[in-house]
Image (tube, coloured by chain):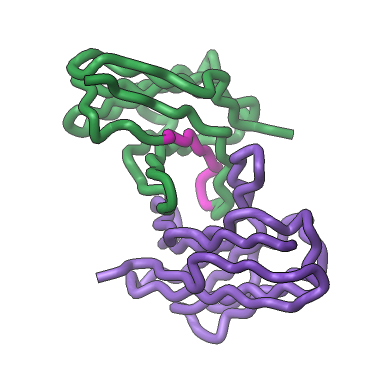
Amino acid sequence: DQQVKQNSPSLSVQEGRISILNCDYTNSMFDYFLWYKKYPAEGPTFLISISSIKDKNEDGRFTVFLNKSAKHLSLHIVPSQPGDSAVYFCAARRSNDYKLSFGAGTTVTVRA
Amino acid sequence: DTAVSQTPKYLVTQMGNDKSIKCEQNLGHDTMYWYKQDSKKFLKIMFSYNNKELIINETVPNRFSPKSPDKAHLNLHINSLELGDSAVYFCASSLIDSEAFFGQGTRLTVV
């Protein structure tokens, strides 16, 4: 049973524009959320995280928004660059729990 | 300077064989994990060790046996390999309440 869902398998965006990736979760006990980026033949790389006590966290071009009531989070990439083309995984866990639950990933393609 | 390294990167083997995947981290983390990415691309946790003690053991066939000789190493041994074991296996490590760092993955193909 998938507790973290990324319903858009792919996203294509023009260079310089905004990329918005969405993620939904079903487990209300989750209180820590992460985004990972993955290039082909490499492992996932941590990108940004957010705790449930916040509704926004920003790091350079990357911003994560959390809507707890809707059990929804999103990742905004502004502006999108060709190097952002990768698979993005949403993940979630409970505090003091080592186990991460992952979504299926969204493949982002940034067009020149 | 590799943070989490796993070997081999590719592994092709016949059904019924026994194989091992090794993982080492030099980040000083106290927790290590094995994740499996199946054909549908889902990443699912298999095992986790904290300070050499098993803390997570998901529903995994007992043909899979993790071994942690010390905090910096977590190996995965698989007995009697089956076609359905074909997947990419990722090792990861973390400190408690912090993000996990992943290795590059081992693509296992059982023929």
Nearest the eye: B24 or B81: B81
Please give the name of the residue rendered at 60% of the width and 34% of the height, measured from the top-left corner.
Answer: A29
Placement of A70 over or under A43, stated as above or below: above
Nearest the eye: B100 or A6: A6
Placement of B57 over or under B41, stated as above or below: below
Q: Quadrant of residue A3?
A: top right
Q: Is residue A75 magenta?
A: no
The secondary structure that most of the magenta stretch takes on is: strand
Rendered shade, chain B: purple
Please give the name of the residue rendered at 32% of the width and 16% of the height, measured from the top-left corner.
Answer: A13
Image quarter where the C terminus of chain B lies is: bottom right
Placement of B11 over or under A57, stated as above or below: below
Can residue B25 be seen in the rendering of this structure?
Answer: yes
Please give the name of the residue rendered at 36% of the width and 46% of the height, measured from the top-left corner.
Answer: A46
**Residue A96 placement, left or right of B13:** left
Q: Quadrant of residue A37?
A: top left
User: For the magenta stretch, what is the residue range?
Assistant: A87-96
Please give the name of the residue rendered at 43% of the width and 57% of the height, measured from the top-left corner.
Answer: B102
Residue A20 appears at what percent x and percent y?
36, 17
Residue B20 appears at what percent x and percent y?
63, 77
Image quarter where the N terminus of chain B lies is: bottom left
Nearest the eye: B88 or B65: B88
Q: Residue furthest bottom?
A: B69
Residue A57 appears at what percent x and percent y?
29, 29
**Residue B89 placement, left or right of B65:** left
**Residue A63 placement, left or right of B32:** left
Chain displayed in green: A
Can residue A78 be seen in the rendering of this structure?
Answer: no
